[in-house]
Image (cartoon, rainbow, N blue to C red):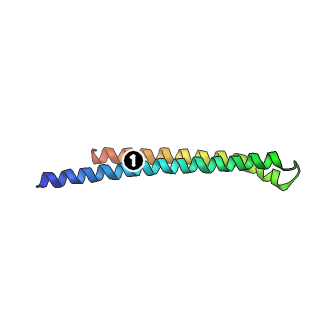
Amino acid sequence: MNRIIEKRNIDAMLLALLRTELANRRTLLAYIKTSLGTGITAIGLLKFTEEQSIYALLGLILVPVSFIILGLGITDYIKTKKKIEDEKKDAEV
């Protein structure tokens, strides 16, 4: 009986870790989507507005912002992935 309970606990832990890994991937994809949207907006503002308008300035500001968002997303993904791997080692799964 104890062996069955132990197996269920291991299965529950494994499923929790898998859900966490999938959530981490979804979060990275959300960062990428936001970065792409910001970059496309920046390019659109630069392409379709006059050079001296406030919108062109906003486009120039949004270009590096899109790269910053992407960098933050990748950094967050790597940090979280490391924490998940550490948890797997601790749980011996």
Left or right relative to 76: residue 83: left
Q: Residue at x 52, y 47 (%)?
A: 28
Q: In the rendered view of the protein, which quadrant contains the C terminus?
A: top left
Horizontal side of residue 83 vs 88, given as left or right: right
Amino acid beneath label 1 = Ile
Instruction: Describe residue 32's horizontal placement relative to residue 2 as left or right.
Output: right
Q: What element carries label 1?
A: helix
Report x, y in % for residue 50: 87, 49
Question: Whole-percent x and y of residue 11?
Answer: 26, 50
> Which residue is under mark 1?
84
In percent of width and height, residue 77 lies at 49, 46
Residue 74, percent from left and from top: 54, 44
Total marks shown come to 1
Point 56% across, 48% down: residue: 73
Q: Residue sitting at 81 percent across and 45 percent down? A: 47
The crowding category of the residue bearing disc 1, from other C-alpha atoms within 10 Å (few below 14, some 14 to 19, many at least 20), is: some
